[in-house]
Amino acid sequence: MKTFNENIRTCNKGHKYYKSSECPTCPICEQEHKPENGFLSLLSAPARRALENNGVTSLEELSSYSEKEILKFHGMGPASLPKLRSALKEKGLSFKN
């Protein structure tokens, strides 16, 4: 059985944080990286990273993918699709068919 101290980690920037899973992402760095506005600010951290890791950082880039393709990105779940659809619609865009 692991104790609390065994799960304390330190990221490359020196932040100390507790993490019970094997996920290496520092929550402090992740919060610092979160955009304050734009469609990426609407998403959870895993969904945002899924898009960023696949080079999708604008609505124009997002509109070149189908919903099915987006859901294949590791970290992207169906709960993010309504937010993405809404952001696309506001700009007169939509997912590829």
Image (spheres, grey):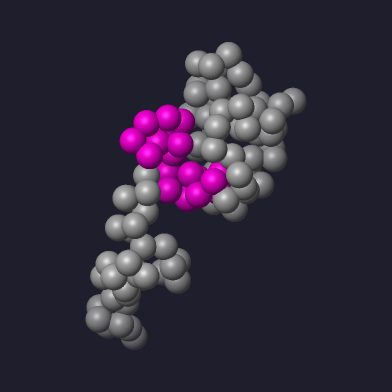
In the rendered view of the protein, which quadrant contains the C terminus?
top right
Q: x and y percent of residue 30 in the render? A: 37, 54
Q: Residue at x 64, y 40 (%)?
A: 70
Q: x and y percent of residue 50 in the render? A: 55, 48
Magenta span has 79? no
Magenta-highlighted stretch: main secondary structure? helix
Q: Is residue 91 left or right of residue 63?
A: left
Q: Which residue lies furthest to the bottom in this view?
A: 1
The correct choice, above or below, for 30 with respect to 20 in the image is above
Q: Which residue is drawn at 50% across and 23% down?
A: 87
The correct choice, above or below, for 9 with respect to 72 in the image is below
In front here: 90 or 76? 90
Q: Residue at x 32, y 50 (%)?
A: 32
Q: In which quarter of the image is residue 5?
A: bottom left
Q: Which residue lies furthest to the right in this view?
A: 97
Number of numbered discs: 0
In the rendered view of the protein, which quadrant contains the N terminus?
bottom left
The correct choice, above or below, for 93 with respect to 57 in the image is above
- Residue 23 visible in this rendered orientation of the protein: yes
Q: Quadrant of residue 9?
A: bottom left
Q: Give the range drawn in magenta.
A: 35-52
Q: Residue at x 33, y 35 (%)?
A: 36
Q: In this view, does 26 lie to the left or right of 81?
A: left
Q: x and y percent of residue 28 in the render? A: 30, 58
Magenta span has 48? yes
